[in-house]
Amino acid sequence: MYLRTLDAAAGEGRSTISSSAIARAFGFTDAQVRRDLACLGQTGRPGVGYQPVTLAARIRKSLSLDRTWNLAIVGVGKIGAALMGYPRFAGGGFRVTAAFDADPDLIGQDIAGTRIEPLSQLERSVREANVDLAVLAVPGPVAQSVATDLVNAGIRGILNFAPVRLHVDVPVQPIDLSRSLEQLAFEVSSTA
Amino acid sequence: MYLRTLDAAAGEGRSTISSSAIARAFGFTDAQVRRDLACLGQTGRPGVGYQPVTLAARIRKSLSLDRTWNLAIVGVGKIGAALMGYPRFAGGGFRVTAAFDADPDLIGQDIAGTRIEPLSQLERSVREANVDLAVLAVPGPVAQSVATDLVNAGIRGILNFAPVRLHVDVPVQPIDLSRSLEQLAFEVSSTA
DNA sequence: CGTTGTGAATGTATTCACAGCG
DNA sequence: CGCTGTGAATACATTCACAACG
């Protein structure tokens, strides 16, 4: 989140930005911002503020975003296909280098410059293409089994769109669209 | 999250489930589960556990999920189009009743049973179709302006896929795919 | 028994408030 | 001055541990 505002500030040509200015952009407090940034060590200058460009670079380094991560799209249904051309991935150090599906009609097709391969090719292609992370967009019932295969193939992390909790020993970042909608509905009826 | 496990337990025909069983499914503690459920009042029976069906119904009521919510998809690019047929929305009390885009080539097309209308029709159609919530999947630069229009048209909440913070006075649920990937990358390099 | 519901204890996150610095 | 970095204070969340209950 900090990267977004820092990049925006840098884009506007600002050479400094204060903790309270950053806080205002998000709706939390200046003390929170300083506390968060403190874990990077001394980064701001008293009386002046923070340097967007320098600070952003430092955050990128801390988050290991100063390299390129190779992605595999696993499950090229509507959501998987939509993500294959997602421009914000390419802009942020992420690159789709492989795609897999079970559907014979999809296999061999080219989407956004990547050829769709059968799931049987998973292990071999993941290693060949040096894939780091997988975007898992398969139906819930098969998600766990595919996830296990992915980890065996050497995947290091999973962005999981399937509505099930995965039991694997790599980091998983779940994205549960239904749950987000449900939470939204709850907040709406609470603030009524 | 509780609904997912409770529904699963009900589906397997279980008539009771204990706090520790629920906790195991998620990886947190039994005390946490009981504390969370306590806010619904007395729901379980000592020595026995919780009734999946009854409890799920009670949670649905508390979250206002015991009704149908009408959705508008705003921005029918790849992601917006993918969500129009998303089966898990329909299964959970959400129904797409309108869709809008700025692109003249898309307007008039039918996707998953809903006709795409021009953004100029927004206000009128939102009222006619009784839309409650909007799924905002437009490019970042125009997101704020479209969001403002949506609120003026009477929308009560926004599921926001655009990578910007929206300043509106209705609840917003952001889904930032890049940020989730970045967090995943960070976790992967931390556990290395 | 086994399991809930909840006071009390602990742990963690956020905010306050101010010394210190350019 | 204005603003950071951080001890101290506060608020919040989680866990412990046990009485109560069928």
Image (cartoon, coloured by chain):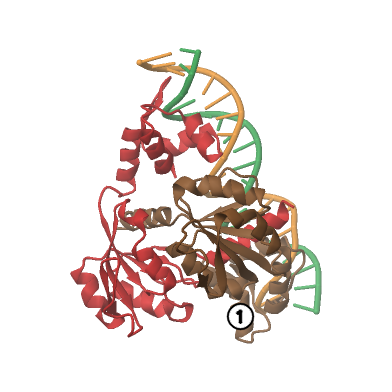
Chain colours: A red, B brown, C orange, D green
Q: Which residue is mark 1?
A: B9
- Image quadrant in which you'd find residue A54: top left
Where is residue B75 shown, x and y percent of the image?
50, 58
Extreme left residue here?
A128
Residue at the spot x=25%, y=76% of the render?
A123
Where is residue D22 shown, x and y percent of the image?
80, 79
Where is residue B113 shown, x and y percent of the image?
56, 75
- Image quadrant in which you'd find residue A184: bottom right
Q: Is residue A39 visible?
A: no
Residue type for callout 1: Ala
Question: Of B74 and A9, which appears nearest the observer?
Answer: B74
Q: Quadrant of the N terminus of chain A?
A: top left
- Image quadrant in which you'd find residue B67: bottom right
Q: Is residue A16 left or right of residue A71?
A: right
Q: Is residue A49 visible?
A: yes
Q: Is residue C13 left or right of residue A182?
A: left
Residue at the spot x=45%, y=63% of the render?
B105
Residue at the spot x=61%, y=56% of the render?
B122
The crowding category of the residue bearing disc 1, from other C-alpha atoms within 10 Å (few below 14, some 14 to 19, many at least 20), is some
